[in-house]
Amino acid sequence: MGWLDAAAGYQVRVGENGRVQCRNAKGKVLGAVPAALKEDPEVVRLRQLVEWLDRHRAECLSTVDDWLVRSLPVPTTLLAEVWPDTAWSDALRDLVVTAGAETGFLRDADPERGVGLVNLDGDTVWRHPETVSIPHPVLLDDLDDLCEFAAELGVEQRAQQLFRQTSARPAEPPAGDHVSDYADGRFEQLNHAMARCRALGYPVRGGDAVYSAYEGGEVVQARFWIGADYPEGETWTGDLRWVRADGTTIPPAEVGPVAWSEGMRMAASVYAGRVVEEVAA
């Protein structure tokens, strides 16, 4: 954006780095906004704009991640409408999408031409289906090949898809109603475990870290026990289980691929923050 006049001969703008920049009367761009300008109306207005843009980018990325996790069909017209907004296009660009019979990396969207893809042969093609699917990576049969091709293209996805931690349900899932792979992780305080869940974006309800997955149109909750005693007290992680919307437990052998993968991803991420005992040399 252009420079705006502020007090004492200074000028301010939002720079390419998304932060408020300031230059003096001689045209020199300063490393920081002078303290005397912190309450200047133009500076305050630009900082509010920066805060809004940060929230907007985060909301766009969160929405795209939701489309991905749910493998939702997204109208091509919607993609074309939001693409000019860089917050949207940055979140969407280079995701692997399925447009009709064509699968490739999303590079563009246009009201007239549809979606522009780099297909698996390396060709740029345009397709105009009614909807575009953004598959969860666990549903991609050729995931390893896609990751290799993405590396060749220099693809960097803002929404985690190809490089998302995934876990395939084993051919012989554990018997019973839970998985214990990430049990017995010790945290010095329950507060620490809860803080880790919050940082990772997982709500905690009734002693469980919770993730709501969507499998075949049904909401499936993955629940990973982190404890429900005193917040300042020591706690250990427990079992991971899956339940339907009505609270009934789903046996591991019946859990769908997306719910399984996202549940294991949640449990592994929380468990990674446990206290790791040092082994004496």
Image (cartoon, helix red, strand yellow):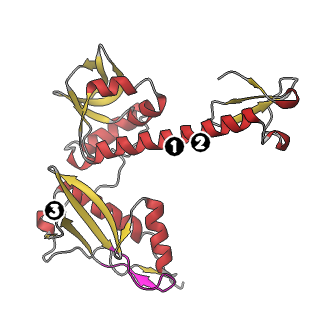
CA separation in Å, label 2 and label 3: 40 Å
Report the residue at 37% width, 42% height from top. Answer: 63
Report the residue at 29% width, 14% height from top. Answer: 113
Comparing labels 2 and 3, the label whose residue is closer to the camera: 2
Residue 95 occupies which quadrant of the picture? top left
* Contact (Cβ within 8 Å) of mark 2 with mark 1: yes
Task: Between residue 124 and residue 204, name the one nearer to us.
Answer: 204
First to last magenta residue range: 225-238
Report the residue at 29% width, 64% height from top. Answer: 264
> Looking at the image, is mark 2 or mark 3 earlier in the sequence?
2
What amino acid is at disc 2? Glu
Name the residue carrying label 3.
Answer: 255
- 60 in the magenta segment: no
Report the residue at 36% width, 66% height from top. Answer: 268
> Looking at the image, is mark 3 or mark 1 earlier in the sequence?
1
Name the residue carrying label 2.
Answer: 51
